[in-house]
Image (cartoon, grey):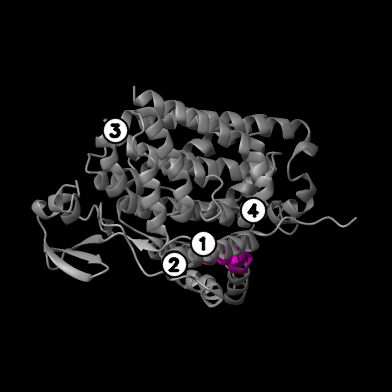
């Protein structure tokens, strides 16, 4: 009997895109007016159904619009995206997305996501160069020998360090670079690729879920809610510690189980494929970690350190990060004394290996474009805010947490979610009698928890790199999602008491 394979990530996203296109014919179109600060003219630009108007950039203007955000949050650049103006939602003429728009959406998404796509392709090129030099294989062999009998340290360190990156500066898209590097290390340690994927992806998801100083969620959401970002910080730190510990214990349980019996791995049927993809290469597998290979690994590691410093301290983004990896690839090529022809062939092949991931990223962005062009995102937000009216504190904050879970399917961007929802949702806290920091927490926890399985987020791109099906990821992760869901709802309830 012929078995049916689970759809690929690309097919799943196209199905979701078709579903969203249908929703634009069903959900009424509507929009909020938006407010943007124009630094050149020192004015506010209000954009609505009646056009664009210029308003004085002062606190009186904000108060008249019921926007409870200090003026300096705009003038300092903390809030640089258009925010939704409370009480301005209005129905507009529908703009349903038909077959023509559906077909164009992935193409538009690839164009719009060009910055992150090129980052992924250049990372692939760098990995191709590293594989050709044999530095990976020699380094992995050395590390596997050094950690023999203590492989669990790899799980604890990786998950903790990635979570720290997520909570402090929003380490998320950058983790796409880690999979080709770290998955071979986990496989050499006698784990499977799911363990490596979980350490990296869960570390990032839990870290950003419990963000502490992350400017793309905590700070921008607090600013948009009109509060200081340090308000509620202690609770988020406590949640970070609890969720990271739970995640590590969960991964260790699975890892120890498959280490004792490899046949219990959820991807045991892919063991040959995984060995071909991430195992040691026959042509370089016997290389010793000599001085030249150590220098190559040092340059490679330095590229990631420079990237992290640039993103967290120097306001770098995808262009600068991509340039770092290109320079690193060229330097490694010189150190390894690769010919120009071999360098280009290896770089091109490495980039080509991640082309499928680039398409996943583009199609996911296309889904978001369909929602925006179909004018249904604000309608979903408006109805979500109306649901919570009249609830008591505990029910209210937990309902909002679940609503943010759902909204993140439609708005997978943390900063985009913050500026769109906080001006609408945060005043609801005043009517219920709780602090606005709980709205920020509900937003962070909701987005972060759902990001673990959100098909319109980064999970499918990550799975695409590791060649693991979405169904197998769901089978692995759903018990942890339930555990974190219960823990989060308990914590949110306690904070309202």
Left or right, 228 with respect to 493, comes to left
How many residues crowd around disc 1 within 10 Å: few (fewer than 14), some, or many (20 or more)? Answer: some
How many residues crowd around disc 2 within 10 Å: few (fewer than 14), some, or many (20 or more)? Answer: many
Work out how far the residue at label 1 is from the one at label 4, CA to CA, in angstroms.
32 Å
How many residues crowd around disc 4 within 10 Å: few (fewer than 14), some, or many (20 or more)? Answer: many
Are the residues flagged by discs 1 and 4 in contact, CB closer than 8 Å?
Answer: no
Residue 421 in picture, x, y percent from top left: 33, 50
Query: In the structure shown, which secondary structural element does the residue marked by tag 3 occupy?
Result: helix
First in sequence: mark 4 vs mark 2: 2
Which residue is labeled 1 in the image? 23
Name the dominant secondary structure of the magenta segment.
helix
Are the residues flagged by discs 1 and 2 in contact, CB closer than 8 Å?
Answer: yes
Res. 335 in view: no
Query: In the structure shown, which secondary structural element does the residue marked by tag 1 occupy?
Result: helix
Give the magenta range: 350-362
Residue 353 lies within the magenta run: yes
Q: Which of the two discs, 3 and 4, sits closer to the camera?
A: 3
Residue 482 lies within the magenta run: no
Residue 258 in picture, x, y percent from top left: 73, 35
Q: Determine the residue positioned at 67% across, 37% down.
A: 145
Query: Which of the labelled discs sits on residue 466, or is there none?
Result: 4
Which residue is labeled 2 in the image? 374
Q: Nearer the viewer, residue 200 or 211?
A: 211
Q: Determine the residue positioned at 17% across, 68% down.
A: 53
Q: Determine the residue positioned at 50% across, 47% down.
A: 451
In this rendering, the answer to whether 227 lies above or below 33 is above
Work out how far the residue at label 4 is from the one at label 2, CA to CA, in angstroms.
33 Å
First in sequence: mark 1 vs mark 2: 1
First in sequence: mark 2 vs mark 3: 2
First in sequence: mark 1 vs mark 3: 1
Residue 147 found in image quarter: top right
Work out how far the residue at label 2 is from the one at label 3, CA to CA, in angstroms.
33 Å
């Amino acid at each position: 009997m012929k078995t049916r394979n689970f759809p690929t990530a690309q097919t799943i996203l196209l199905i979701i895109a078709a579903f969203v296109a249908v929703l634009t014919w069903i959900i009424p179109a509507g929009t909020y007016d938006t407010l943007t600060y124009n630094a050149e003219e020192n004015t506010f630009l209000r954009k609505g159904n009646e056009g664009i108007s210029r308003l004085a950039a002062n606190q009186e203007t904000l108060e008249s619009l019921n926007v409870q955000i200090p003026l300096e949050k705009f003038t300092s650049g903390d809030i640089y995206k258009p925010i939704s103006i409370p009480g301005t939602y209005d129905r507009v003429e529908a703009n349903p997305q038909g077959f023509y728009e559906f077909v164009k959406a992935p193409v538009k998404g690839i164009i719009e996501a060009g910055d992150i796509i090129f980052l992924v392709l250049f990372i692939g090129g760098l990995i191709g160069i590293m594989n050709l030099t044999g530095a990976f294989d020699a380094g992995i062999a050395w590390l596997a020998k050094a950690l023999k009998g203590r492989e669990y340290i790899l799980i604890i360190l990786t998950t903790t360090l990635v979570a720290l990156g997520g909570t402090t500066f929003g380490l998320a898209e950058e983790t796409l670079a880690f999979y080709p590097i770290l998955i071979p290390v986990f496989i050499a340690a006698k784990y499977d690729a799911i363990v490596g994927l979980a350490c990296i992806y869960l570390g990032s998801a839990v870290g950003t879920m419990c963000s502490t100083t992350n400017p793309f969620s905590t700070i921008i959401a607090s600013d948009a809610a009109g509060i200081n970002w340090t308000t509620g910080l202690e609770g988020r730190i406590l949640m970070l510690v609890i969720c990271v510990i739970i995640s590590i214990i969960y991964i260790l349980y699975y890892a120890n189980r498959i280490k004792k019996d490899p046949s219990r791995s959820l991807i045991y049927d892919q063991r040959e494929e995984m060995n071909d993809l991430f195992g040691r290469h026959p042509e370089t597998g016997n290389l010793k970690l000599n001085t030249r290979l150590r220098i190559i690994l040092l340059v490679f590691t330095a590229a990631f350190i420079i990237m992290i410093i640039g993103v967290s301290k120097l306001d770098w983004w995808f262009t600068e990060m991509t340039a770092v990896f290109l320079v690193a690839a060229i330097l490694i090529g010189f150190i390894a004394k690769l010919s120009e022809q071999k360098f280009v062939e290896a770089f091109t092949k490495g980039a080509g290996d991640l082309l499928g991931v680039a398409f996943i990223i583009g199609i996911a962005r296309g889904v978001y474009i369909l929602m925006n062009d179909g004018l249904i995102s604000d309608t979903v937000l408006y109805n979500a805010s109306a649901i919570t009216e009249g609830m008591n504190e505990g029910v209210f904050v937990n309902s909002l947490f679940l609503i943010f879970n759902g909204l993140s399917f439609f708005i997978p961007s943390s900063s985009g979610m913050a500026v769109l929802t906080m001006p609408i949702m945060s005043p609801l806290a005043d009517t219920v009698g709780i602090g606005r920091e709980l709205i920020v927490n509900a937003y962070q926890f909701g987005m972060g928890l759902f990001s673990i399985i959100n098909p319109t987020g980064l999970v499918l791109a990550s799975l695409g790199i590791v060649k693991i099906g979405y169904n197998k990821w769901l089978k692995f992760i759903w018990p942890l999602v339930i555990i974190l869901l219960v823990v989060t709802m308990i914590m949110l309830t306690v904070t309202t008491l």
